[in-house]
Amino acid sequence: MKVAVTAASGQLGTAIIYELRKRLGLKDIIGIARNPEKAEHNFIEIRKGDYNSKEDFLEALKDIDRLLIISSNDAPQKRIVQHRNIIEAAKECGVQKIVYTSIMGESHGNEFSPVVSSNRQTESDIIESGIDYSIGRNSLYIEPDLDYLENYIKEGKISNSAGEGKCNYTSRAELAYAYGRLLLSDSSNGKIFSLGGEAITQSQLADMLNMIHNTNLVYEEMSPEDYLNERKEALGEHLGTIIGGIYNGIRDGAFHFDSDFEEAAGRPHLSALEMVMEYSRLKS
Ligand code: NAP
């Protein structure tokens, strides 16, 4: 069986290929990247594939049996078209199974909803293609929050609009473990999995960071409007709206759910504390 992973230059793509290398021979794994030279660190064959080019994928998917599509990070309406390029090429090339990394969240109601909605459209497009599939709806990665540790320490606090909302944080490594299994097993066919770990609040995240880093961080709640404006000012309109919308979504419970991780991965998810500890270990 020959499998391919898109966005092989990215962090999730690299983590999934790392998991697949433990389970398949190197010759059976193909990475696809719009800039192939950026994916050479995977030590497997890399083929060119820009999501904007169906032609690229008609070439890249020629002898591929199973395909893992990592969701694009472009504007929502553009993503739908990009994902369709890949799905159509997969169908024409006779790919037997697609696994898609979708996203948790609400299709309506906050500034992140257009992104969620575009992912739901791709889910439907995959289902309607008639190709076997498994879909994972990823919860939020914990890493971007932990990347902010230096800023939190400078300010003495974590401040955002999540309030008392809980989030079933996950990590790229945990997701990669689950996706390796979803791609290779048939028992997951035709299913949509909600993928996340333990649900925690921002105050609990601050407590964990204090425990591991010997800090005295507190959590400070901001209003959704103030946080959105602050993020737009710091990150620009597009990214600021997405990040603001994500924390407003946490506040409203959009990332608090019953996880199917154990069914998808065949083992329990790491606890939130274990993920924070693992992140610190890798950084040190
Ligand atoms: P990442 O490290 O930023 O990687 C993004 C990947 O997408 C890169 O390989 C990039 O290629 C590729 N890409 C972008 N546009 C492309 C195009 N037109 N054609 C082909 N490849 C393209 O992000 P990540 O951590 O791997 O995350 C993967 C996806 O998860 C993101 O794309 C986004 O949809 C989503 N995401 C989820 C969360 C979450 O918390 N669940 C957070 C952030 C993002 P280059 O290397 O050439 O740029």
Image (cartoon, rainbow, N blue to C red):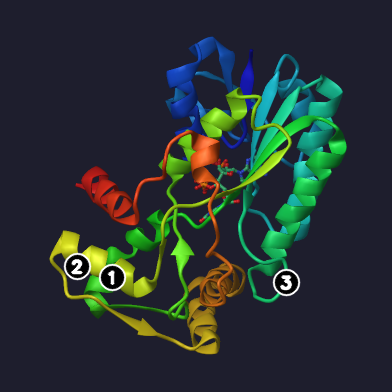
Q: Is residue 16 above or below residue 228?
A: above
Per the model, the C-alpha gap separating discs 1 and 3 is 29 Å
Q: Is mark 1 within 8 Å of ligand 1?
A: no
Direction from residue 235 to residue 184 in the image, left or right: right
Marks 1/2: CA distance? Answer: 6 Å
Residue indicated by mark 3? 108
Task: Residue 207 in the image: state x and y as whole percent.
Answer: 24, 69
Q: Earlier in the sequence, mark 1 or mark 3?
A: 3
* Image position, residue 272 (x, y; %): 34, 55
The residue located at (61%, 57%) in the rendering is 104
Q: Is residue 183 above or below residue 254?
A: above
Residue sitting at 51 percent across and 73 percent down? 247
Q: Nearer the viewer, residue 255 or 86?
A: 255
SS for dot 2: helix
| 265 left or right of 96 in image | left
Which of marks 3 and 2 precedes in the sequence?
3
Query: Which of the pair 262/95 is nearer the observer?
Result: 262
Residue type for callout 3: His
Camera sees residue 10: no
Q: Please rate how many residues cluster around mark 2, counting C-alpha atoms within 10 Å: few if below 14, some from 14 to 19, many from 20.
A: some
In contact (CB < 8 Å): disc 1 and disc 2: yes
Task: Name which quarter of the figure residue 156 lies in.
Answer: bottom left
Does residue 176 lie above or below 271 as drawn? above
In the image, residue 98 above or below residue 149 = above
Q: Which residue is mark 2?
A: 210
- The residue closer to the viewer here, 161 or 284, is 161
Q: Residue flagged by tag 1: what amino acid is it?
A: Ala
Q: How many marks?
A: 3
Q: Residue 206 shows which numbered tag?
A: 1
